[in-house]
Image (spheres, rainbow, N blue to C red):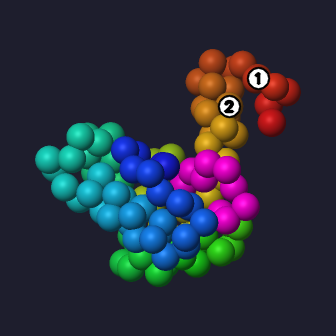
Amino acid sequence: MKLTNRKCDCKDKKKYSILLYRQLRRYCHTPTSLLFPIYGGMGVRCEFRKATELEELYTRDHVDQMIEPFLARKDDAGNFSRENCYFMESKITVQRFINKVYGWEINGGE
């Protein structure tokens, strides 16, 4: 999941983590959110209790070195949690999705 409809400097760990935390909570726990049906409505929950927990992932995964970070889940049916989440480049996420759904490789499956 990447931050949507916001201009955010992903180099600012604290600000980025707070915005992403709020977005995750909204998508998973607020029925009036546009993306609630594909997250919270499908049973996906945000298990992060504080934005500082996302800051730990930010540091672990070196988000400050990424161009367009994306919070991915190891298990797509699993909740957003420290154990199930990791940051990666958005471009790689799109390529993996296309390969998974269509069996196509783009740019050698980078």
Q: In this view, does 62 lie to the left or right of 77?
A: right
Q: Distance between the residues labelled 1 and 2?
A: 7 Å
Q: Judge whether residue 109 is colored magenta.
A: no
* Residue found 69% across the figure and 40% down from its top: 92
Mark number, residue 95: 2
Among the 4 quarters of the image, the one containing residue 64 = bottom right
Sooner in the amino-acid sequence: mark 1 or mark 2: 2
For the C terminus, the image quarter is top right
Q: x and y percent of residue 15 in the render? A: 45, 71
Q: Evaluate if marks 1 and 2 touch, with contact meaning CB atoms under 8 Å apart.
A: yes
Secondary element at image label 1: loop
Residue picked out by circle 1: 105
Q: x and y percent of residue 1 in the render? A: 48, 49
- Farthest right residue in view: 108
Mark 1 packing: few (<14 Cα in 10 Å), some, or many (20+)? some
* Residue found 42% across the figure and 62% down from its top: 20
Q: Judge whether residue 65 is colored magenta.
A: yes
* Residue found 61% across the figure and 48% down from its top: 68
Amino acid carrying mark 1 in the image: Glu
Q: x and y percent of residue 66 in the render? A: 69, 55
